[in-house]
Every structure is written in structure tokens, then in C-alpha cells.
Image: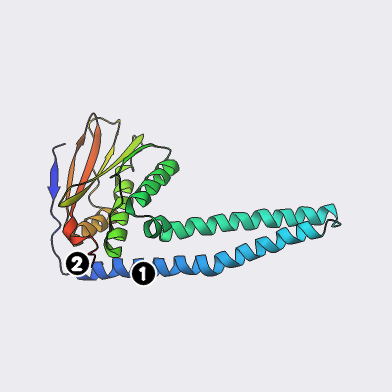
Amino acid sequence: MQPSHLDVPESADSALLTYLQASVEIDKASLAKELHDNLGGLIVAAFMDVAWAEGHFSSFASEARGRLARVREALGSALGINRRIIEELRPSLLDNVGLFAALSWELKQTCARAGLRCAGHYPPSEMHFTPEASIALFRIAQEALAISNIHSSVTTAELCVSTDRETITLRFANDETACPPIEVDRGTVVFASMLHRIRVLGGKLEISPSPPHGTAMTITIPLARILLTRT
């Protein structure tokens, strides 16, 4: 497989797709806040009430204590599910710590779900991206990881993030054991979505072999388009 550079062509639907992606992110952020502030608060309050009852009514029959314990466990599970959904909608690390921490978390979560070994390399300090660029870069990484690790022959996923004075580069590589290397499926909706996000940020995508039998996707984005301007 020879390296290939993909230029994302402009289309009549480009502005609409940009709008739809931005609208989805707004809705996800709104839903995540609603789940955190309201549903999460209700679950925590109920959990605390059950814990209080367990501590103050020691004379409960064993059956009643058992039922309270099950309610407490169910509420704990519900709280965990609520937190997981919130993180999938809008990762709190992205807003509270930064992009590189969020990418590290996403790589580990993706590999854990797929049973893959993972290797991540990131710059030593966070950078200040615009909110729009930050979530776009995160979604690009999510989509690239999904594309890179779709084949059953993949056992290891690697993400290397690097920067210089003008660009940020994200390189996604796998170790497909199939020979010859499996081509990246470029006809999927996920691939089209990723390409569009890259185009909006003024970036480029290169697909190349990753020795011995893997595939690498290298995404390069100009920093001038995505860094937060400080005044």
C-alpha cells in the first residue's frame, strides 16, 4: 500500500454538514449538562437518603435491610451509567484539563473496550485551543480510532500527537497482522465525517503503511486555525 494524500473537496453540502456537526455538539453538551445537574443530582440525593436510612434504622428486619442494600447498589450503578453517558456526550477532561488528557483517556477507553494494547505519546504540556477546535480534534480522534481498529486482526493501537511552530500532527497506527495490509474503508459515513472535520480545520490526511503489516493515518492541522488568541 503506497502512501496517499487526501484532499477533501468542497461541495454544495459542506456548509450544511458543518452546521449539523456543530449543532450536534451543542445538543450533546446541553444533554450532558442536564444529566449532570439534574439526573445526577437526583440519584446522589436518593443514594444519600438510603444510606441515612440504613444507618438510623438498625432495627429493620433483615429482609428490609437487604432491600435497602439492593436499592443502594442499583443507585450506585445508575450513577456510574449516568457519568459514563456524560463523558461519552462531552468528555469533562476536555473542558477541565485539556485536549491531550482527553485524547489519552479516549485511547485507553477505546482499547479497553476492544481488548487492544495501546500506546499514546503526547506533548509535555497542554495547548490552548478554541472550544470549537478542541471538540473537533477530539471527534477526529474518536473517528480515526474507530476506523483504524475496525479489523479483527488489530491487536495494538497507537496514537502519537506532536506539534511544531506551525502545526499539530495526530498519527494513528495499528499492527494489523493480516498480510497484505487491509485498506482503510473510505466509503463509510465515519470516514466522510472525519474528512469533513479535517477540511474545516484546514488540515490534511495521509494514509500510509505502518510496518510490518499495519496502517497509519496521519492528520496535520495548522495551529493558526485552532489556537485560542490571548489578549
Expressed as whole percent of the image width and height from the top left, the position of residue 9 reads 13, 60
Q: Measuring 33% from the left and 48% from the top, which residue is drawn there?
A: 146
Q: Measuring 56% from the left and 64% from the top, which residue is drawn there?
A: 40
Give whichever of discs 2 and 1 has the lower sequence position.
2
- Residue 183's place in the image compared with 51, above or below, is above
Q: Quick one: 228 or 175, which is closer to the camera?
A: 228
Residue type at numbered disc 1: Ile
Residue type at numbered disc 2: Ser
Q: Quadrant of residue 198?
A: bottom left
The image's colour scheme reads rainbow
Q: Quick one: 205 or 159, which is closer to the camera?
A: 159
| Distance between mark 2 and mark 1 Cα atoms | 19 Å
Q: Measuring 77% from the left and 52% from the top, which residue is drawn there?
A: 66
Horizontally, residue 174 falls left or right of residue 199, namely right
Residue 171 at least partly seen: yes
Q: Residues within 10 Å of mark 1 (few under 14, many from 20)?
A: few
Q: Which mark is residue 169?
A: none
Q: Tell me the mark number nearer the camera, choosing from 2 and 1.
A: 1
Can you identify the residue that label 1 sits on?
A: 26
Q: Which mark is residue 14?
A: 2
- Residue 29's place in the image compared with 205, above or below, is below
Q: Quadrant of residue 177?
A: top left
Q: Quadrant of residue 116?
A: top left
Expressed as whole percent of the image width and height from the top left, the position of residue 111 reads 40, 41
Q: Quadrant of the C terminus?
A: bottom left
Q: Residues within 10 Å of mark 2 (few under 14, many from 20)?
A: some
